[in-house]
Image (cartoon, grey):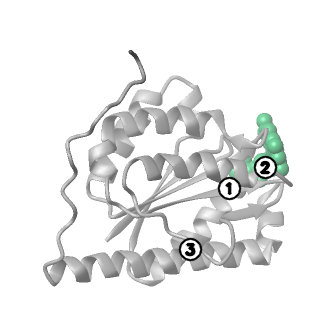
């Protein structure tokens, strides 16, 4: 089983990366393969198509998704938003029904609004949300701060354990004959008379 992790920060090894690494370590302990993509810089330097294609290919064989973003002006980073808009455009069907979670890293505030925005991509696409023992957030301006945020790090580890539990439950369900729902043809009701 494999989980794809997305780092939506421009800083490759910053706070978001530190939180995602804690999750990845816990997933690996349970035998789950992880693949981390750093999309932040590529999203702004003209390599958006390339990174969207790479992740779209990776999610085909993935079982779960975790998207991490720094908080910019109480919202997800512009990079991660632009990336997700594109990814869900091309890989929507490959992501459907796969458990997902968003995590946010902030110096101080704006995490709830950030998580709210990110979670909506999953909710829109029938992806079960994986929860933790608190909101999925860490605090800091640099990785050292995040490592000292013990509650935040525990929240990341618990999120990973819950992801493992959901993934293994889905696998066990499939093995015992429980089928994935068959999506209805989408109805679009535009409010135009
Ligand atoms: C453009 C910009 C806007 C930011 N806005 C906020 C904010 O609204 N609230 C906050 O707590 N931190 C804010 N920060 C700080 C970062 O969210 C925080 O330091 C985060 O942990 C950095 O994660 P990273 O190292 O993965 O990039 C902002 C940082 C930048 C660069």
Q: Position of residue 70 (x, y in %)?
A: 70, 48
Q: Are marks 1 and 2 in contact (CB under 8 Å)?
A: yes
Q: Position of residue 44 (x, y in %)?
A: 59, 27
Q: Which mark is residue 159?
A: 3
Indicate which quadrant contains ligand 1: top right
Q: Nearer the viewer, mark 1 or mark 2?
A: 2
Kind of element beneath mark 2: loop
The residue labelled by disc 2 is 110
Sooner in the amino-acid sequence: mark 3 or mark 2 = 2
Among all residues in the image, which is located at the extreme left?
Answer: 177
Q: Name which quarter of the figure residue 90 lies in.
A: top left
Sooner in the amino-acid sequence: mark 1 or mark 3 = 1
Q: From the viewer's perspective, is residue 135 above or below residue 54?
A: below
**Residue 64 falls left or right of residue 78:** left
Q: Name which quarter of the figure residue 178 lies in.
A: bottom left
At 74% from the left and 54% from the top, the residue drawn is 111
The residue labelled by disc 1 is 104
At 78% from the left and 65% from the top, the residue drawn is 146
Q: Nearer the viewer, residue 40 or 64?
A: 64
Q: Position of residue 86 (x, y in %)?
A: 43, 32
Q: From the viewer's perspective, is residue 148 above or below residue 30?
A: above
């Amino acid at each position: 089983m494999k989980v794809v992790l997305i780092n939506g920060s421009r800083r490759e090894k910053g706070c978001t990366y530190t939180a995602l690494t804690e999750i990845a370590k816990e997933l690996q302990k349970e035998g789950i393969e992880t693949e981390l993509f750093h999309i932040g810089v590529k999203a702004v330097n003209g390599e958006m198509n390339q990174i969207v294609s790479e992740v779209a290919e990776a999610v085909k064989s993935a079982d779960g998704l975790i998207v991490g973003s720094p908080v910019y002006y109480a919202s997800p980073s512009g990079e991660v938003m632009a990336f997700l808009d594109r990814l869900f455009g091309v890989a929507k069907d490959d992501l459907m029904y796969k458990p997902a979670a968003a995590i946010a890293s902030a110096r101080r505030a704006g995490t709830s609004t950030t998580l709210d925005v990110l979670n909506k991509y999953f909710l829109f696409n029938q992806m079960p949300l994986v929860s933790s023992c608190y909101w999925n957030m860490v605090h800091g301006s640099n990785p050292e701060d995040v490592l000292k945020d013990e509650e935040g790090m525990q929240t990341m580890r618990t999120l990973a354990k819950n992801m493992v539990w959901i993934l293994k439950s889905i696998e066990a369900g499939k093995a015992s004959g429980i089928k994935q729902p068959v999506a209805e043809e989408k109805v679009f009701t535009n409010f135009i008379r």
